Image (spheres, coloured by chain):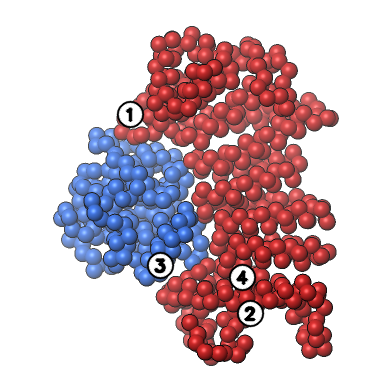
Chain colours: A red, B blue
């Protein structure tokens, strides 16, 4: 820690350096905090000696910047963050009190208006502490006066940079949603911005597992999509989903997309082609899910996805003699021949899933559990299905399945028994 | 589906520190500044698991969002770092194949390997890492391989259950010569913030 008084130059030297690096390389796409010992290693890997980086004030070895990556030494983080926050709050005060007018216009240059100071220091503080709400809000305040699309797309760039180091920061994701709302209000909603957002979430989801906030953001984007884009998204994200079978978030996203398709069918002006297309999409998803379930044994996310697919298939895509629309909650599903055939196939799937091929791997036991839970969950929605199950498998077998579920998923059994 | 790393260790004589014989890893999906630490952790965790995998045993250890699979066949131990999506059967099928290929290429020369020897790059392992990212390739092996022998696979929900009673991962991290100061710092930081985005 520094002792004794120092001039403003010295005290904020690190911050100035940091802000200078950011300004001089606008293409930085990744920020990270690095241990001081990593500098030499990073230089070696980048393939050059450190000679020309010899600092004249002994502070250059705190930032590492090559190939548009910026590393900040961990030993200066706390001080840097304090300094950035301090100057930011000062600048914000100045901005709020005096608006954007310079106090000494003849001395200060255009590049240091109160507004630009707020933006500069808030950028620095947010890269170090992404959840600092005051800073994000200050930026919102200033941006709301902007009239160029570029200001907003540049803001997307900054928040993307913050996410490279803090991919789970809710304030950052929320700020992105604000930007998109502003863009769609002031300008139009360019489809490619939504597409890029979706791709960003996928790439962040790859690096940062169990990132609920990223996936929530992706689901939120769906409300800005037209049906054609929804279908494109469904197709584009299929491969990723097939490689991340334990990831329920990505299947939840697919369900959100499919719900949008379903919703659009009940909007005025929907024609037979739309219905046929939706029917095809649903059938393909069901078949693909079945392939995956048979290939990758014991994956709960796949079986949960099947619950959604099967139930909606029965309700909206088969002739079932009842008038259902999405607003109705618990509607009675009346059996029809088409449904009976579908159920028959599902029972076959259940039977084949219950065959344990070997006991060496836990997967097969998990598969039985998930298959049985799936089937019994469906009987909750379709009481007639229980009768069909008992016919096919025998009452004893069904009782045995119920007790098995009772051990592993007591809450499901509780619902079934009380029906 | 992702295989982050494949390693081969010499685990003989029993209860000596395993010697690393081969190592291939793909850390491109990690943040730029974390990559070297990830590689170090792979070696550290791999060595820790290998040293606690007795001969003829297979085990899988869940660590963070990874499954670390290990198979010790007569003192030669193959370790794979796979994600949750990669099927366990395919993983062991691949480890079997790695051991077969290793013995084909190096016979029994590995028995005299020492830690000080530099780890040579084994091109096959790098190829395998790429090829078997798709588990369908590993499943093809199952058909032509002799039956995986009857040993059950032991599953550990955390790495702590592999350690001996009284051993803590934290102290192993501190004592390990596989981990640089930087990696130890990352480990401590991740624990402090209690985030689930740790590097192994």
Q: For residue A358, which numbered disc appears in the image?
A: 1
Q: Give a yes or no on whether discs 4 and 3 share a subunit.
A: no
Q: Give a yes or no on whether discs 1 and 3 share a subunit.
A: no
- Viewer can see residue A147: yes
According to the image, label 3 marks what residue? B185
The residue closer to the viewer here, A256 or A363, is: A256
Q: Residues within 10 Å of mark 4 (few under 14, many from 20)?
A: many
Q: Is residue A379 left or right of residue B151?
A: right
**Chain of the residue under the numbered disc 2 shown in the image:** A
Separation of residues labelled 4 and 3 (CA atoms): 22 Å
Q: How many marks?
A: 4
Where, by quadrant of the figure, is residue A162 drawn?
Answer: bottom right
**Chain of the residue under the numbered disc 4 shown in the image:** A
Q: For residue A20, which numbered disc appears in the image?
A: 2
Say above or below: A229 vs A129: above
Q: Which residue is pictured at 37% across the width and 47% down the height?
A: B62
According to the image, label 4 marks what residue? A125
- Closer to the chain start, of discs 2 and 1, is 2
- Closer to the chain start, of discs 1 and 4, is 4
The image shows residue A153 at horizontal and vertical percentages of 73, 62
Q: Is residue B175 left or right of residue A332?
A: left
Q: Which residue is pictured at 81% across the width and 74% down the height?
A: A99
- Closer to the chain start, of discs 2 and 4, is 2
């Amino acid at each position: 820690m520094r002792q004794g008084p120092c001039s403003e130059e010295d005290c904020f030297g690190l911050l100035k350096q940091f802000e200078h690096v950011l300004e001089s390389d606008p293409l930085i796409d990744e920020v990270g905090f690095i241990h001081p010992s990593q500098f030499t290693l990073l230089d070696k890997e980048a393939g050059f000696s450190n000679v020309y980086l010899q600092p004249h004030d002994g502070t250059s070895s705190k930032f590492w910047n090559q190939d548009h990556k910026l590393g900040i030494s961990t030993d200066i983080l706390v001080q840097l963050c304090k300094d950035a926050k301090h100057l930011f709050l000062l600048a914000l005060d100045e901005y709020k009190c005096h608006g954007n007018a310079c106090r000494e216009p003849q001395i200060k240059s255009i590049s240091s208006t109160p507004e630009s100071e707020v933006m500069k220091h808030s950028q620095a503080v947010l890269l170090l502490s992404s959840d600092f709400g005051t800073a994000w809000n200050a930026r919102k305040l200033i941006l709301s006066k902007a009239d160029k699309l570029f200001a907003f797309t540049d803001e997307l760039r900054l928040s993307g940079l913050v996410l490279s180091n803090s991919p789970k920061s809710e304030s950052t994701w929320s700020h992105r949603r604000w930007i998109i709302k502003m863009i769609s209000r002031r300008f139009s909603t360019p489809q490619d911005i939504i597409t890029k957002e979706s791709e960003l979430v996928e790439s962040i989801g790859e690096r940062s597992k169990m990132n609920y906030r990223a996936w929530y953001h992706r689901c939120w984007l769906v409300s800005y999509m037209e049906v054609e884009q929804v279908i494109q998204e469904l197709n584009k994200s299929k491969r990723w989903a097939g490689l991340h079978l334990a990831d329920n978030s990505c299947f939840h996203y697919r369900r959100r997309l499919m719900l949008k398709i379903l919703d659009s069918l009940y909007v005025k002006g929907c024609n037979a082609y739309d219905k046929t297309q939706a029917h095809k999409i649903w059938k393909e998803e069901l078949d693909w899910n079945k392939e995956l379930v048979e290939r990758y044994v014991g994956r709960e996310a796949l079986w949960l996805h099947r619950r959604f697919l099967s139930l909606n298939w029965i309700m909206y895509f088969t002739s079932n003699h009842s008038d259902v629309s999405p607003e109705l909650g618990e509607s009675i599903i009346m059996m029809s021949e088409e449904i009976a055939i579908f159920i028959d196939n599902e029972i076959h799937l259940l039977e084949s899933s219950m065959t344990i091929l070997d006991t060496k791997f836990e997967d097969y036991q998990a598969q039985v559990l998930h298959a049985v839970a799936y089937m019994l969950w469906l009987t909750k929605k379709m009481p007639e299905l229980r009768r069909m199950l008992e016919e096919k498998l025998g009452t004893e077998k069904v009782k045995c399945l119920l007790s098995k579920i009772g051990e592993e998923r007591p809450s499901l059994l509780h619902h079934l028994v009380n029906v | 589906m992702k295989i982050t790393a494949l390693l081969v260790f010499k685990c003989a004589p029993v209860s000596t520190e395993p010697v690393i014989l081969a190592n291939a890893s793909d850390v491109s999906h990690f943040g730029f500044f974390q990559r070297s630490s990830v590689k170090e952790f792979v070696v550290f965790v791999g060595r820790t698991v290998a040293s606690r995998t007795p001969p003829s045993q297979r085990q899988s250890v869940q660590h963070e969002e990874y499954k670390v699979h290990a198979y010790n066949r007569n003192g030669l131990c193959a370790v794979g770092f796979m994600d949750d999506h990669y099927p366990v059967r395919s993983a062991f099928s691949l480890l079997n194949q790695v051991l077969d290929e290793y013995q084909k290429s190096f016979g029994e020369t590995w028995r005299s390997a020492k830690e000080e020897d530099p780890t040579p790059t084994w091109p096959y392992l790098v190829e395998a890492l790429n090829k078997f990212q798709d588990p369908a390739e590993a499943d093809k092996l199952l058909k032509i391989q002799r039956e995986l022998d009857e040993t059950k696979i032991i599953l550990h929900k955390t790495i702590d259950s592999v350690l001996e009673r009284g051993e803590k991962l934290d102290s192993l991290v501190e004592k390990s010569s596989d981990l640089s100061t930087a990696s130890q710092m990352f480990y401590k930081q991740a624990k402090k913030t209690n985030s689930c985005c740790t590097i192994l």
